[in-house]
Amino acid sequence: MVVTYREALNQAMREEMRRDGRVFLIGEEVGYYQGAFKVSKGFVEEFGPERVLDTPITEAGFTGLAVGAAMTGLRPIVELMTFNFGILALDQIVNNAAKIRYMSGGQLSVPMVIRGPGSAAHQLAAQHSQSLEAWFCHVPGLKVIAPATPYDAKGLLKSAVRDENTVIFFEAQLLYGTKGEIEEGEYTIPIGKADVKRAGSHVTVAAYSKMLLLALEAAEELSREGIEVEVVDLRTLKPLDVETLAQSVHKTGRLVIVEEGWRFAGLGAQVAESVYAKAFHSLDAPIVRVTGEDVPMPYARPLEDLAIPDRARVISAVKQVL
């Protein structure tokens, strides 16, 4: 069955809310407006306003409410209109959601999902275009997921809802309308497992979220030149599946990491360090990272294009390691 990324998320939440009466959705405009990006279309009609809660514009408030609800046995899904607004809820996420299970010696847990779009779209400017995955990956107690395809989005969101920990679930605004095959009926995908989206023998390219689609486009173009790229979709950023990456590097001997986030202290630095530790002797060239520029996102479209990785930069990086 072919569905959009948006529809896959809708199916995942709808199935989990039908399966478990403790699951509820909370956030700005998730109810009668059906979500800023229409991910919760039809929810308030099926589940009612007690399980699909529209909130005031107060990320710290409704995220904190969800933390308390999770501690008492419910399973909240918090929708952030954008992860840029999640900055306002960092105290609740970092100091409460991520730490309460540890601080209580396991007596309390915070099984909740915080989801919504991250990264740049088209000309949303500096305050609405940030890729903040590395921030959340830095915090012990959080799991972080960033799927690229409808299939992965559905299976991983269902696993996230069932997890006993707080899960940060990054979507991307430009992915909502993309389409892909999903399985008929119910399925889940285990958290912490990467996926080889394209087999190759010359270079490994690791990516996630919408950069995964960019990596696949570059791989197709390079294939016409006789360069076969293996594309590994990280999918789960924490815990990171270093084993799958290392196995690919053992085969290809080279690695390019593509991420939209800022370069300095970015997620790709951690991925590179992990691969150096696991597969250093298999590398025939230094690891190369393709990242966003270390600047606030410009509003002007030509400057925005320069600040974000593109296919040409990925192709150049692959040829560099070759």
Image: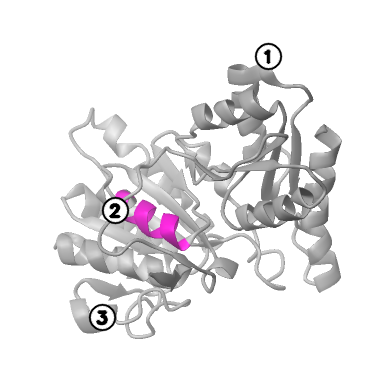
Asked if residue 44 can be seen in this view, the reply is yes
Q: Which residue is mark 2?
A: 161
Q: Please provide the residue range marked out in magenta.
A: 150-159
Q: Is-magenta flag for residue 151?
A: yes
User: Horizontal placement of 316 versus 76: left or right?
Assistant: right
In the rendered structure, which amino acid carries the disc numbered 1? His
Q: Nearer the viewer, residue 105 or 250?
A: 250
Residue contact at pointers 2 and 3, CB within 8 angstroms: no
Residue type of the residue flagged with mark 2: Val
Q: Mark on residue 281?
A: 1
Which quadrant is the C terminus positioned in? Answer: top right
The image quarter containing residue 42 is: bottom left
Q: Looking at the rendering, in which quadrant would you find the N terminus?
A: bottom left
Residue at 38% across, 48% down: 167
Q: Nearer the viewer, residue 196 or 236?
A: 196
Relative side of 302 to 266, left or right: right
Camera-side residue of 132 and 240: 240
Instruction: Point out the tag, 1 or 3, that comes first from the N-terminus.
Output: 3
Residue type at numbered disc 3: Val
Q: Secondary structure at mark 3?
A: helix
Dot 2 falls on a residue whose secondary structure is: helix
The residue mark sitting in front, 2 or 1, is: 1
